[in-house]
Image: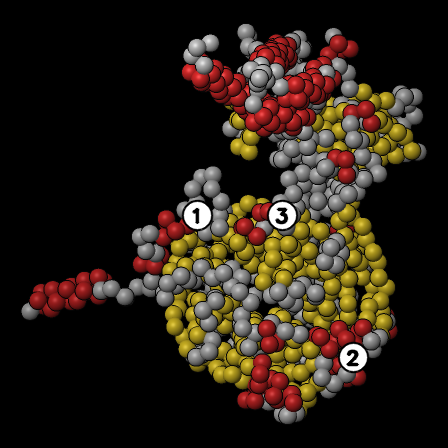
Amino acid sequence: MTAALLGAAGVAFLAINTMPGCKPNTTKTMVTGDAASKVYVKPGTHDEFYNFVSGGFSGQLAVYGLPSGRLFREIPVFSVDPESGYGYSEETKGMLMTSYGFIPWDDSHHPELSQSNGVPDGKWCFINGNNTPRIALVDLGTFRTKSIIEIPNSAGNHSSPFTTGNSEYVVAGTRFSVPMGDDASRDVSIKTYKENFKGNVSFIHPDPESGRMSIAFQIATPGVNFDLSHAGKGPSEGWFFFSCYNTEQAYSLLEVNASQRDKDFIMAVNWKLAEQLAKDGKGKRVPGKHYSNWWNEETHSAETTVYEDVLQLDPKDHPGLLYFMPCPKSPHGCDVDPTGKYIVGSGKLAALIPVFSFEKIQQAIAANDVEGDFGGIPVLKYESVLHGEVKKPGLGPLHTEFDANGNAYTSFFVSSEIVKWNVEKLEVVDRVPTYYSIGHLCVPGGDSKQPWGKYVIAYNKITKDRYLPTGPELTQSAQLYSIEGDKMELLLDFPTTGEPHYAQAIPAELVKPREVKFFKIEENKHPFVAKGEKETRVERRGKEVHVWMTTIRSHFAPDNIEGVKLGDEVYFHVTNLEQDWDVPHGFAIKGAANAELLIMPGETQTLKWIPTRVGVWPMYCTDFCSALHQEMQGYVRVSPANSNVPLEAYTLSVDAEL
Amino acid sequence: MEDNRIMRPISRVMIALSALALLALLFVPIWRIDLAAPQYPEGLYMQIWADHFSGDTEKINGLNHYIGMAHIKDEMFTEFRILPKVIMVLAALGIVAAAWGRRILLVGGLVTLSLFGAWALWRMWDWGYKYGHELDPKAAIKVEGMAYQPPLIGHKQLLNFDAWSTPDIGGWILFGVMALLAGVYFLEVRDLRSKLKARAKASPAS
């Protein structure tokens, strides 16, 4: 009897153990047989899409190919990069100058491709610096940072740098509201948040030719935390939408104190009106020192413009400029669908997704259908502006992207999934797990007027057991899903650098024709260029020794320098004379306290070197440039400060040396 | 009576057009050399015009210094100084032949053009020989017994490079002109024969 019972229990145990569905889904059950062929890009062939992915705490912008997930490049933007000399060479230091001095790092969150007629055009990629508020513009001809502007009267530039349909403006907003104005107005107790702390949103204009950026105007707002934003398009062209949380105006323990209200806001900005007001001189200049840095491709050097103030518009003086729309609860993502008719708020603590109708917003504004005001800004009635709610979509909605067929894809951090839903019908049509805890997501063209669709990519916050372990610090990760069928289908995991926040993807064919292969030496206007070996020399200017140096496969000219003394500052101005694709040269000298240089063909870059000991110091090329790369070297002789060794530089030919 | 030594108008027009076509050689590349290596998937090329080189000569020079080859520059091919004049003279002679109309001039033209072509090829070969053989003794890379003379026409392997030498537009025009003139000559001869035959039939008595 007992034995029979035990036997039955054994059978039951076995049955439970082998029953399908008792364990959570794993990749084994997720990935179908032909996934590999869908992401396989044959050696020697190109990916279909570029994927520009934020580096998060790396401060940089990473470039991947899709569908392969291969990493091509990490573009130095806000953080110094010793391997290329970015932020270390004399020319590039200016790119990282701010009113706070030289800031060698930042936290980069949101890449945004420039647009023409509401569609990414492959010309530029913007990205925000969250910590020391900045926006950078990366040129997709050179894949280099072309300009960086500092945002004054701001703290924590998170809701940025989203663009208008023709990149007339990219925006910035204050994640932290702060006291602004002169020193006395800023030195206030944190407890006076409600009276003294203000927010603002900035509209930055990139010059369409040069890419140089300037702040067109700022709009003052009540003190809240701005989180994300997107421009209207089509019927909503001319408007901008910002999500904001902490309408409780808490200044301590925000995780509790800023989570009390059922609804926070999405702020609608009539930027066409703001533009007109600014043009009509309705704004006023307020203090706001900031730097605008721009890379001059002819002098191969940064140029900095310093502004002392900024044009500000006060919405209290200009009714119709700003409106608040209640949005449950602590909204994060603020996304506009391709038709421009609907605005999706993602209340990260809400159990639903509200979708607002632009048409209804306009009707509510016309009918003055308001429930009150917040800091003097009218608050429209939630029910009046709502298209509808997606009920019980998942837990912790963060961001939404779109395809061209009327579907939205929303990431859910807490329930770790992507949920596909129909924008018009507000119905969930599919869901798929992510591994693990997705933050942002990206559909190629997914925040534009014409999404290219095909894939949705999840950028996850946690990887745990997904890859070979590497100690306490693990790789970050993205996951590629096909959205071509009715069901989303996981195709690929790929590791990412830094921490990926937002990302954008664009067909490679829109970017490839812009590629710059090298810089023309005849167009080089660097003040210390040597356009041939005949122009190389050394010159002493007091304690400074300037070396006009060239590189060509495979030697430096000059490669021997004597007469440098302790206490001198040596400036190596290195011009790469090569005029072919993919022939950079490196420059390194022993004991260099800053970095090495990586000099592209036709370019001039300068390394400052302060010798610390008497002796002969080696220098060499760090980029394997040719069969004779290992011969590409030279010496610098350093003598005591009081020595009489004359300054000379030479490169000896074979005849002279033998 | 008709002069049998004079060509038909259509042939004279063809000769005049050929002469004008020769002038095109002053404005288009005549020959080209293509190079390919694993690390040059996009390829390198060089074109030879009536009076200069063009193409990736700077890149080729950059590579060739390892094996001690001379820098390619226009001054090293001295024929560049006279080639345009020679072409103009040939074209002028063609016009004269068309105007004068004597068939014997066509024969002369064909012979002259063939001599010109042979001379040009010989000069190119000679230049290529010197370029490929007269190497800097201090070159970094020396391969025993290796010379780097580019092929005159067709393909040749030069260390890690595959080299192809082919006529460019100008070369094809020159060959075309020669073929056209040969054709004109052939038709002229046939026409003359049939005329002579017809004349013999018309006056069997004489």
Q: Do the residues at pointers 3 and 1 share their chain? A: yes
Q: Secondary structure at mark 3?
A: helix
Residue under the image location 55 percent in, 10 percent down: B146
Residue A392 in sight in this render: yes
Front residue of A6 and B45: B45
A456 left or right, relative to B96:
left
Mark 1 is surrounded, within 10 Å at the Cα level, by few (under 14), some (14 to 19) or many (20 or more) other residues, namely few
Q: Earlier in the sequence, mark 2 or mark 3?
A: 2
> In the figure, residue A166 lies in which quadrant?
bottom right
Residue A637 in sight in this render: no
Chain of residue at mark 3: A
Place of residue A538 in the rendered image (x, y in percent of width and height, measured from the top left): 85, 27
Place of residue B187 in the rendered image (x, y in percent of width and height, measured from the top left): 49, 21
Chain of residue at mark 1: A
- How far apart, in angstroms, are the residues tagged by discs 1 and 2? 54 Å
- How far apart, in angstroms, are the residues tagged by discs 2 and 3? 41 Å
Q: Nearer the viewer, mark 3 or mark 1?
A: 3
Q: Secondary structure at mark 2?
A: loop
What amino acid type should be assigned to the residue bearing mark 1? Leu
What amino acid type should be assigned to the residue bearing mark 2? Asp
Q: Which quadrant of the rendered structure holds the C terminus of chain A?
A: top right
Badge 3 is on which residue?
A514
Badge 1 is on which residue?
A468
Badge 2 is on which residue?
A314
Q: Do the residues at pointers 2 and 3 share their chain? A: yes
Mark 1 and mark 2 residues within 8 Å of each other at the beta carbon: no
Residue under the image location 41 percent in, 50 percent down: A39
